[in-house]
Image: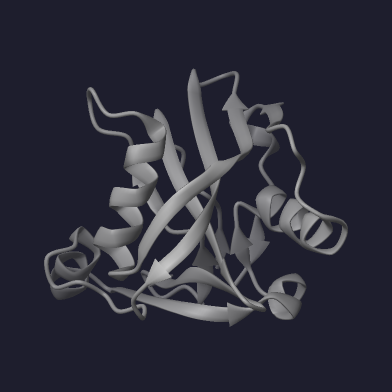
Amino acid sequence: MLVSFRIQKMRSAGIVIRGDEILLMKRRKNGSGDYYVIPGGSVDAGEDPETAAVREIKEETTVEVTIDRLLYTHVYTDLDARSFFFLCMYVSGEPSLSKTSEEYWDMQIRDTYYEPCWVPLQSLGTLPVFPVEIRDALIRDVTRGFPSEPQTTELKSTELITLEV
């Protein structure tokens, strides 16, 4: 099954690294194979992207984080949409799906699966992680160091890389 990254008007996500691991959300939808996303979600009305990233990580994974800095922004020019990816500092907690999260309730009524988990950084290149463009930037930047200034990529939704899972 071909899987692609769903684009929201404004999405905020947190890149959480603890030692040699990264926090990801393992997913499966409608009989697809397993794939991973960086924890995050929609920015609520009146909310700033930083607050949204911290809130979404806590809601989805029960892990506590603080924001270090903005690393990457995707601007989807054909949809007037943006995704923000923040480098976050791990504070506490072990990943588990909160029973109050949308993901938990989605699993109760649909053919879906969500599991927040720590994944070895060295395995990123072998996993279907979405968006692929951010996965590839992480592989590059974990090795050479994260950029001091945020990196912005403008693309059309039709230019997103898809993977077979």
Q: Nearer the viewer, residue 89 or 131?
A: 89
Decide: is 149 above or below 58: above
Quadrant position of residue 132 = bottom right
- Residue at 70% in and 36% down: 159
The correct choice, above or below, for 117 with respect to 30 in the image is below
**Residue 62: which quarter of the image?**
bottom left
**Where, quadrant-wise, is the C terminus in this rendering?**
bottom right
Q: Position of residue 18 (x, y in %)?
A: 56, 73
- Number of numbered markers: 0
Taking depth in this image into account, of 36 and 97 the one nearest to the observer is 97
In the image, taking residue 133 as reference, residue 78 lies left or right, namely left
The colour scheme used here is one colour
The residue sitting at 75% across, 50% down in the picture is: 146
Q: Position of residue 148 (x, y in %)?
A: 75, 38
Q: For the point 36% across and 81% down, which residue is it?
A: 94
Q: Is residue 120 above or below residue 151?
A: below
Q: Is residue 59 above or below residue 156?
A: below
Q: Is residue 53 visible?
A: yes
On the rendered image, what quadrant is the N terminus found in?
Answer: bottom right
